[in-house]
Amino acid sequence: MKLTDDVKIFGGTSSEALSASICDYLEVRPGVATIAPFPDGEKLIKLEEDVRGRDCFVVQATCRPVDSSLMELLIFLDCLRRASAARITAVIPYFGYARQDRKDSGRVPITAKLVANLITTAGAGRVLSIDLHAKQLQGFFDIPVDHLTAEPVIVSYLKSKEVSDIAVVSPDVGNMKTASRYASLLGGDLAIIHKRRLNGSEVECSEIIGDVKGKNVVMCDDMISTAGTMCGAAELVKARGARSIIAAATHGVFAGKSVERLKSAPFDEIIVTDTIPLKDGPKALGIKILSVAELLGEAIRRIHNNESISSMFESKS
């Protein structure tokens, strides 16, 4: 998978390990840059090698601390633009602020659009991301967006477990299409949870559309944030006779009381990818971490060689 020296891949502080794994897959040397804080908290980024006329990629998830990670990405992009890189791609494994994608009440911002504008203005000519919270976010950018999904990575792992009698459960109606794809790929049944959100971190799961009795349940979502939805759904399917429950999500955000909730929830296994580095709390749960390095690495290779991205998923469907 080795690329030419015309490609430079830089990793930000929130995605150092993932960026290194991508470089290993592509057999390229990681780009060298100094990222240092000033005493007042400002950040300095200095490229330690020439990028003039090269195809450059910055790997930086905008995860916690969200504002600091986002600002670092913007500074990196501006740095590359002023250093005369030929093309700059922002590789954002996890796109923060994605849930603020509409005005759901009066006098609130559409922060996802603001962030898209900032990334474009800073110098990105292209964005590469995985499992955006809403696919329509691609339209917030006025530059090309390559939207990947971690489904092949998660499905491959689940198939390796050779689980029988699978029921794929969508923890809410909004995730139904994703759950349907998982059910098709895994050869399982489909069930949907009807939930009612009580507040920002509390939900009530009241009914299941579909049968889970005696089934090995796979519960899939794009992220586990406060875990209220996942844990409420797990309690319900367990009460309805599920044999085992696996939670699978692309992004392990693990905010608020998520760790405490997951500890007491009836999950047999929790699966996330390395789009976000895991903190000590979630690590203590023994969560299975799958790597998206090869997925992102292959996309980077194809972008550099002007090859199709969508065919990566057509061949796996």
Image (cartoon, rainbow, N blue to C red):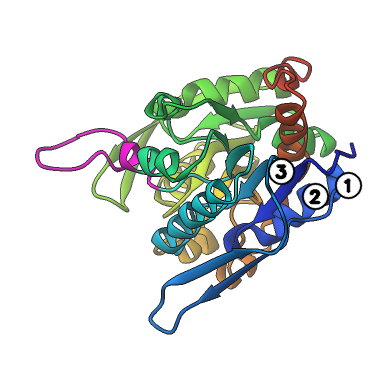
Q: In this rendering, does residue 215 appear at all?
A: yes
Say left or right for 195 vs 38: left
Label 3 vs 2, first from the N-terminus: 2
Taking the magenta stretch, the answer to whether it contains residue 105 is yes
Q: Position of residue 192 (x, y in %)?
A: 46, 26
Q: Which amino acid is tagged 3? A: Val
In the image, residue 70 sits, relative to residue 6, either above or below, namely: below
Name the residue that disc number 3 marks: 292
Mark 1 and mark 2 residues within 8 Å of each other at the beta carbon:
yes
Q: Residues within 10 Å of mark 3 (few under 14, many from 20)?
A: many
On screen, residue 63 above or below 223: below
Q: Indicate which disc residue 23 carries.
A: 2
> Residue 277: where, in percent of width, then height?
62, 60
Per the rendered image, the range of residues in magenta is 97-114
Give the quarter of the figure containing the C terminus.
Answer: top right
Q: Residues within 10 Å of mark 2 (few under 14, many from 20)?
A: many
- Asked whether, in this view, residue 220 is left or right of residue 140, the answer is right
Q: What distance separates the C-alpha of mark 3 from that of mark 2?
A: 12 Å
The extreme bottom residue here reads: 39
Name the front one of labels 3 and 2: 2
| Figure quadrant of residue 89 | top right
Q: What residue appears at the point 77 percent right and 56 percent down from the top-left corner? A: 30
Q: Main secondary structure of the magenta part?
A: loop
Q: Secondary structure at mark 3?
A: loop
**Of marks 1 and 3, the one in the foreground:** 1
Residue 70 place in picture, x, y as percent: 44, 55
Q: Is residue 30 magenta?
A: no
In the rendered view of the protein, which quadrant contains the N terminus? Answer: top right
Q: CA distance from mark 1 to mark 3?
A: 16 Å
Res. 241 in view: no
Q: Which residue is mark 1?
A: 27
- Using a 10 Å C-alpha cutoff, classify the residue at mark 1 as few (fewer than 14 neighbours), some (14 to 19) or many (20 or more): some
